[in-house]
Every structure is written in structure tokens, then in C-alpha cells.
Image (cartoon, rainbow, N blue to C red):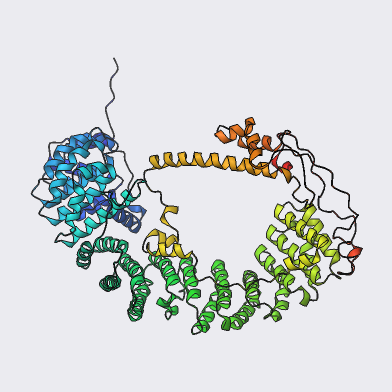
């Protein structure tokens, strides 16, 4: 007979204490259990403040805030105490408010692990919802909504009905948020019990906090209802703001906490004003919120004014509203770095719509020595946006100072900002170029390289204006080791090849190391050498032949090879066309006023103070809407239909491309093969097993099926040998009239590699895709 070992461990001791006959011992055990739960910071808050109580959203915010501020030393080892669920549940019925809150916090954390036992707490919840103490009534209804257990949803309706009509405003505002949580779990239950109608009636409540929570709940329900595919304006969950509701919201706005003000302001941003007078009224009532101490309230008020100012026609009022926006935005820059960065992102968005808001406040965006890099970069962007004739001198002085900092990324951004200022303000371009020359003279590698990149943009904006700078740039050739800087200098040399005496020698340096350079440098070298040949054909024949040979024979980039073949064909057939293409006029560049599309900008202005305005992207690009399971099923069904359509489209493309086997054969001779083409060829292709598998979505290896379709002997178009042409040198001596046009072209070696004009050999099935071309 085996002897059972004694049960030991912390959980066992807690279980004994939770079932103790002494009330204080049970309470201490509950505290220990709560301290081991994930929300131990919230437990400390409950112990410090007897009246402390939070809804879900605020709880997450405060939990994160205290965890960050207090540090990791506050985090205690987490012990799995889910097995103590029945023992903790026995201690729910108590008159000790502190103990009741601790038990409820435990239920919030572990109800999902014990869904079958949660039903045992229903009687206590219902009893607490009738408690004389309003804190207990609110705590009970809040906890029932947070548990998200299917088994207790049906028992929640009656207590919720009573709490929505409770005489205490604290209970009513808590019950309003509980309706939104219940709608997320079971929308039809909320509609059947008339909770939505009760919420709409509560907008007229005498307590502003009840109004704010009611608006927050209706807004959440509105978002959830709008996310449904079959939603319409007649959907009971859609929250339509009428003129009467508008007046009630404006009355409650000044009496709410910052949470309530943000909720009401977000609702006001959705309201569509009926006329100009109503738009002016909304703006005038919201403007006082600019003076609020909370940055979220300030940004939400900015959003409302920016939306409704569109309906204001009086120029004086518009200027007055814009002028009142500047002081609160400047005040936000005195916040901690993280909040300051969020404010800067929103300011950047506002300035794209109305740059006059902070046109005289550029100095407040000057960087401080202790600003983090992400704050400095945002400030640089805003400074360039605010640059004008009246402040450009101060801006250039500041940017020149930044260029001597130790942070390499910040220095590069500062030099780039100087170039952007030169492109933006014509009258300040010369001053910007002088500052850049002073920076180049420092011989600091990364400063010189960024300055070369910036000078390329200045040359594009002001062609043939600052040619005196070119010798200084070329003298720093040895300092360049980054692809972008090399490509920029090569572009400058090619663009002004006719005015640089030793342009061929400078370009020859890059031609010699052509294969080892990055693709961007190779492309720019190829174009610059062709420009040189078109401008100085007598002295650049050898270098153009060398670079074309390397680009077509030794380079592994298809982009570089394709460009080399195009240049080769242009030079060998029509030098006039080559000049028209390579030396074509390029319009001057400019700094775009906005970084996003105008339509997207209007959408983002309606999302100010949200994540969309920080990312400068619509919410749907980074937030999933609806329930994952339903959405994924619907998307898969739609994607399957799209895949079938795409597969058939691909087969049509394949059929149409059968006559273009040699992509470089530009001959006018028609190819007649007697095979069907276009839609008829698609029908033939679709009968093949590989195509059938591909279109039905049953293909185990789509790549092999595509290869077999391409390489099918039955569909391959027979090709004829090209007509023999007179021998010519690689650049087409005969086409140039024996070298008369570009004197001396005939001296190029005729043994150089010429573009592949011959017929591609017949491909075998299952050959790699590169062989198809």
C-alpha cells in the first residue's frame, strides 16, 4: 500500500488560507493571490485608493503607464493561481469593499481559464447589482461585462436594465460602457432588450460624465456596426448625430473629464454641418478646448476645427481660427519626447493643409541638444516646410550648425534639408550653395557625400546656373564610397560633359570598376558615358564601346543589360533618336507641398490624434476590422474568384506573346505560324493538363505548370531565320553614314559583342524560366 506524499507548495498554502475561519487571514490570502496575478500594479492601486475603479480601456492605459514609470523592479514573479478559482469564489460575498474589489480583479484575470465555474458567481453579481452602495453596484455590472463569458451573458440583461436607470450617475455611466461590451459579444441581445434606445435617451442626461460615456459607447457600437458588410443607415447600431444631439454634446463638452471630452470631440468630428452658420457655431464652441492641459484634448479639438472650418466662408473668421491654433501647438512642444514626437507628426499633417498656422513660429522647432534623434528629424521636416524668404537666413545658420554634430544620421538629414531649402526658395539658392561649399571644405566623408547628392538636386532645379561648383565636386571624387553619392556625381559629369575637359578620364574611373559597382552606379555610369559620346563623339568612342561590352557581357543585372541593349540599338540605327531620348529636356524638380495624396490628406485630417495621423496612413492599412474568422473566410472566397480570373488572364497573355519569342527582334517581318492567337489560343491552352490544374487552383507546383505551358511543343511558334544583313560594326557604322555624323565611329572594332538578334533555340519542356526568353 503506497503512502501519499504530503501536499506542499505556495498554492496549497494559499488554498488553506482562503478557506480559513478567520476573515483577516482570508483577506491576506486574497491579497497574495492578487499580487501574483498579471495585474499586480492594479492591485496596488486598489489597495492605495479605496474608491479606485476603472473600465477596460483606462485600466490598460493606467496599467501600462505605471509599469513603465515604476520600472521592472515592481514586477513580481507571476504564479499560476488559476487552480484556486473555487476557493477565491467563496470569498465574493463580503461587506469588505477592498476584498470584493480584489476578488473581482482575480475573476477578470482568470475567468477564461475556468469558464465552467464562472456561472457560480452569477448570484453574487446579481445581488451586488442591488447593493445600497453605488460603488458595489457599478463594480458588479462592470465585472460582468468584462468577463466575456458566454454562460453569464443572459444573466447580465436584467441587472444592466436596472443600472441604466439607476439614480446614481456613477452607476449609469458604468452601465453605458457595459452596453458596448455586451454588443461586442452578442449584438442581437442588445437590440432585442432595447439597450440602444436607452443609450440614445441617456444623451440627454443631466450629468455630463454620463453623456460622455454614452457617446463613447454609441461610437464603439457604431464602429462595430459599420464594419459589418451588410451595414446600412437603417442599422440600429449606426449612431446618427442630429442637430438636437449636437446641442446636447456641446453643452456637456465643457463639464467632462479629458476622457469624456475626447469622446465628445470625436463624435463632433463625424457630424456633417447643415450650413455655414452651424459650422461657425461648432468652431466657436470648440476653440476654448485649445487651452486644455491634456494634449489629446487639444489635438481632438484641432481635428474638429480643421473639419468644420471647411464650411466657414468668412475670411476674417477663418484667419482668426487659424491664428488661435498656433499657441496650443507650440505648447505641445514642451512635453516629454514621446508626446512631443506624436505632436510633431500631427503638426506636420496640419501644416500640409494649412502652412500658415505656424508660419511665424519656425524658431520653436529649432533642435535642442538633448532632443532624441526621432524628434530632431521631425523638426527638420517641419522647418523645411515653414522655410520662407523672411526666415531662411536663420534657418541656414541653424542647419549649418547641425551639420557639425556627431550624430551621422542627423548630419545627413541636415545637409539634405539645406538642399530642400534651395529647391524650395529660388532667392535663397545661392546662399544654400555657399553653405554646402563650406561643408564640403571640411572634408568630412559623410558630409561631402551627402552634399554631392544634394548638389545633384540643385543642378536639376537650376540647370546651367552653378557650374562653377563642378570642379570642387570632382576634386572630392576620392572621398565617395557610397552608391548614391557616386551615382549623383556621375550624373553631374554626364550632364555637363561638354563643359568638363577631363570628363572621359573621370568616367573611365567608374567604367574600370563597372562590374564591381552597385546597380544604381552601373545604370548611371552607362547613361553618363552615352551622354559623353553624344556630346564628344571624337574622344569617347573607346569608352562607350568598353562600357557597352561590360554591360551586355559581364553584368548580371537585367535592368543594366536591357538599358545597354536599348542604347546600343539607338546608337546603331538612329543617332537623332538617341539624342532625343538621352539628352531630352527634363523639367525642373520641386518640393511637393504634401507627402500624401490630397484625398488621403483630407481623410487623415479626420483622424488627427489617432494612430493614423502618426503613421500618415489610413487605419485599414495597419488595423484589421471585423472578426478574424468571418473576414478570412469571405476574403478567401473572393480571392479564389480573383485567382481564377488572373489565371485566365495570364493564359491570354501567354497566347498573345507566342509571336514575340525574341524580345530584341524589332524587325517588321510578320510571323505567320498558322497557330491560333489571342482568345482562341487561350481556349487551346486551357485544354492542356497543366493549364487546367493552374486555373482550378489544384496545382501542386504552379511554377512547373507554367513552364510546361510555355515549353509545350504543340503551342511553340516556329520561327524563321532572320534575313541576312550587311555586316556592320557594333554601333552601326553604316547607319551613321560611314562615320560622317560622329567622325571616327568606323574605327570601332567590329569584333565587339552585338545584341542577340538571332532566333532563340527551341525550348524543351520543364526548362527553367530564363530559357523562355
**Residue found 61% across the figure and 42% down from its top:** 650
Q: Tell me if 708 is positioned left or right of 374 in this view.
A: right
Quick check: 216 above or below 230? below
Q: Is residue 50 visible?
A: no
**Residue found 69% across the figure and 79% down from its top:** 464
Rendered image quadrant of residue 465: bottom right
Q: Nearer the viewer, residue 53 or 358?
A: 358
Quadrant location of the N terminus in the rendered image: top left
Quick check: 592 above or below 361? above
**Residue found 34% across the figure and 71% down from its top:** 311
Quick check: 231 above or below 3? below
Quick check: 410 above or below 688? below
Residue 702 position within the rendered picture, expressed as x and y whole percent measured from the top left: 61, 36
Quadrant location of the C terminus in the rendered image: top right
Q: Tell me if 541 is positioned left or right of 637 in this view.
A: right
Residue 121 position within the rendered picture, expressed as x and y whole percent measured from the top left: 18, 37
Q: Nearer the viewer, residue 707 or 679?
A: 679
Residue 43 position within the rendered picture, expressed as x and y whole percent measured from the top left: 24, 50
Amino acid at each position: 500500500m503506497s503512502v501519499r506524499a504530503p501536499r506542499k507548495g505556495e498554492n496549497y498554502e494559499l488554498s488553506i488560507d482562503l478557506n480559513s475561519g478567520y476573515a483577516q487571514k482570508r483577506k491576506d490570502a486574497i491579497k497574495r493571490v492578487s499580487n501574483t496575478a498579471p495585474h499586480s500594479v492594479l492591485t496596488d492601486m486598489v489597495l492605495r485608493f479605496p474608491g479606485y475603479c476603472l473600465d477596460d480601456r483606462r485600466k490598460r492605459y493606467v496599467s501600462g503607464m505605471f509599469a513603465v514609470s515604476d520600472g521592472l523592479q515592481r514586477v513580481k514573479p507571476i504564479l499560476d493561481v488559476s487552480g484556486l478559482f473555487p476557493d477565491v469564489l467563496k470569498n465574493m460575498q463580503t461587506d469588505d469593499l477592498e476584498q470584493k474589489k480584489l476578488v473581482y480583479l482575480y475573476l477578470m484575470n482568470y475567468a477564461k481559464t475556468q469558464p465552467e465555474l464562472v456561472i457560480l458567481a452569477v448570484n453574487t453579481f446579481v445581488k451586488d447589482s442591488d447593493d445600497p452602495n453605488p460603488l458595489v453596484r457599478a463594480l458588479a455590472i462592470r465585472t460582468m461585462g468584462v468577463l466575456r463569458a458566454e454562460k453569464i451573458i443572459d444573466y447580465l440583461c436584467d441587472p444592466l436594465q436596472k443600472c441604466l436607470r439607476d439614480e446614481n450617475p456613477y452607476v449609469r455611466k458604468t452601465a453605458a460602457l457595459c452596453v458596448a461590451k455586451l454588443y461586442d459579444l452578442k449584438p442581437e441581445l442588445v437590440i432585442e432588450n432595447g439597450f440602444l434606445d436607452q443609450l440614445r435617451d441617456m444623451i440627454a442626461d443631466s450629468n455630463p460624465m454620463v453623456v460622455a460615456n454614452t457617446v463613447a459607447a454609441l461610437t464603439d457600437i457604431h464602429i462595430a456596426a459599420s464594419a459589418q458588410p451588410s451595414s446600412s443607415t437603417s442599422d440600429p447600431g449606426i449612431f446618427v448625430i442630429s442637430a438636437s444631439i449636437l446641442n446636447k454634446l456641446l453643452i456637456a463638452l465643457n463639464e467632462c473629464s479629458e476622457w469624456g471630452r475626447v469622446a465628445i470631440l470625436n463624435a463632433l468630428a463625424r457630424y456633417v454641418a447643415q450650413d455655414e452658420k452651424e459650422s461657425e457655431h461648432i468652431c466657436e464652441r470648440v476653440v476654448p478646448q485649445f487651452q486644455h492641459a491634456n494634449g489629446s484634448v487639444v489635438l481632438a479639438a484641432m481635428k474638429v476645427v480643421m473639419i468644420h472650418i471647411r464650411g466657414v466662408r468668412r475670411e476674417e473668421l477663418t484667419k482668426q481660427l487659424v491664428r488661435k491654433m498656433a499657441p496650443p501647438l507650440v505648447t505641445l512642444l514642451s512635453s516629454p519626447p514621446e508626446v512631443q514626437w506624436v505632436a510633431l507628426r500631427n503638426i506636420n499633417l496640419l501644416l500640409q493643409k494649412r502652412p500658415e498656422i505656424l508660419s511665424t513660429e519656425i524658431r520653436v522647432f529649432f533642435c535642442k541638444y538633448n532632443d532624441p534623434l526621432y524628434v530632431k528629424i521631425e523638426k527638420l521636416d517641419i522647418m523645411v516646410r515653414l522655410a520662407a524668404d523672411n526666415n531662411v537666413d536663420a534657418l541656414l545658420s541653424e542647419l549649418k550648425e547641425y551639420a557639425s554634430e556627431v550624430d551621422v544620421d542627423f548630419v545627413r538629414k541636415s545637409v539634405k534639408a539645406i538642399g530642400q531649402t534651395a529647391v524650395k526658395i529660388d532667392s535663397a539658392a545661392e546662399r544654400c550653395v555657399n553653405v554646402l561649399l563650406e561643408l564640403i571644405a571640411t572634408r568630412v566623408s559623410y558630409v561631402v557625400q551627402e552634399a554631392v547628392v544634394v548638389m545633384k538636386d540643385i543642378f536639376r532645379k537650376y540647370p546651367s546656373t552653378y557650374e562653377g561648383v563642378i570642379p570642387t565636386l570632382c576634386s572630392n571624387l576620392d572621398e565617395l564610397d557610397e552608391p548614391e553619392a557616386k551615382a549623383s556625381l556621375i550624373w553631374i559629369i554626364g550632364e555637363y560633359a561638354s563643359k568638363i575637359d577631363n570628363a572621359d578620364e573621370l568616367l573611365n574611373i567608374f567604367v574600370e570598376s563597372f562590374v564591381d559597382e552597385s546597380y544604381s552606379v552601373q545604370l548611371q555610369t552607362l547613361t553618363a558615358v552615352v551622354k559623353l559620346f553624344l556630346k564628344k563623339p571624337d574622344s569617347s568612342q573607346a569608352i562607350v564601346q568598353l562600357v557597352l561590352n561590360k554591360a551586355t557581357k559581364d553584368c548580371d543585372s537585367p535592368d543594366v543589360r536591357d538599358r545597354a541593349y536599348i542604347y546600343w540599338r539607338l546608337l546603331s540605327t538612329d543617332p537623332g533618336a538617341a539624342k532625343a531620348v538621352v539628352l531630352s529636356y527634363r523639367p525642373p524638380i520641386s518640393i511637393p507641398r504634401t507627402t500624401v495624396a490630397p484625398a488621403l490628406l483630407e481623410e487623415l485630417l479626420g483622424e488627427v490624434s489617432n494612430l493614423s495621423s502618426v503613421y500618415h496612413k489610413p487605419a485599414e492599412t495597419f488595423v484589421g476590422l471585423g472578426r478574424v474568422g468571418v473576414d478570412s473566410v469571405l476574403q478567401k472566397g473572393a480571392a479564389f474568384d480573383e485567382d481564377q480570373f488572373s489565371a485566365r488572364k495570364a493564359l491570354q497573355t501567354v497566347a498573345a506573346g507566342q509571336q514575340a519569342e525574341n524580345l530584341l527582334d524589332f524587325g517588321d517581318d510578320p510571323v505567320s505560324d498558322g497557330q491560333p492567337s489571342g482568345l482562341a489560343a487561350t481556349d487551346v491552352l486551357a485544354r492542356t493538363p497543366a493549364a487546367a490544374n493552374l486555373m482550378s487552383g489544384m496545382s501542386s507546383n504552379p511554377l512547373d505548370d507554367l513552364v510546361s505551358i510555355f515549353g509545350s511543343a504543340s503551342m511553340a511558334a516556329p520561327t524563321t531565320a532572320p534575313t541576312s544583313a550587311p555586316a556592320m560594326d557594333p554601333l552601326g557604322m553604316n547607319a551613321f553614314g560611314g562615320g560622317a555624323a560622329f567622325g571616327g565611329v568606323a574605327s570601332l572594332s567590329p569584333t565587339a559583342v552585338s545584341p542577340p538578334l538571332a532566333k532563340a533555340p527551341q525550348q524543351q519542356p520543364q526548362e527553367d524560366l530564363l530559357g523562355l526568353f
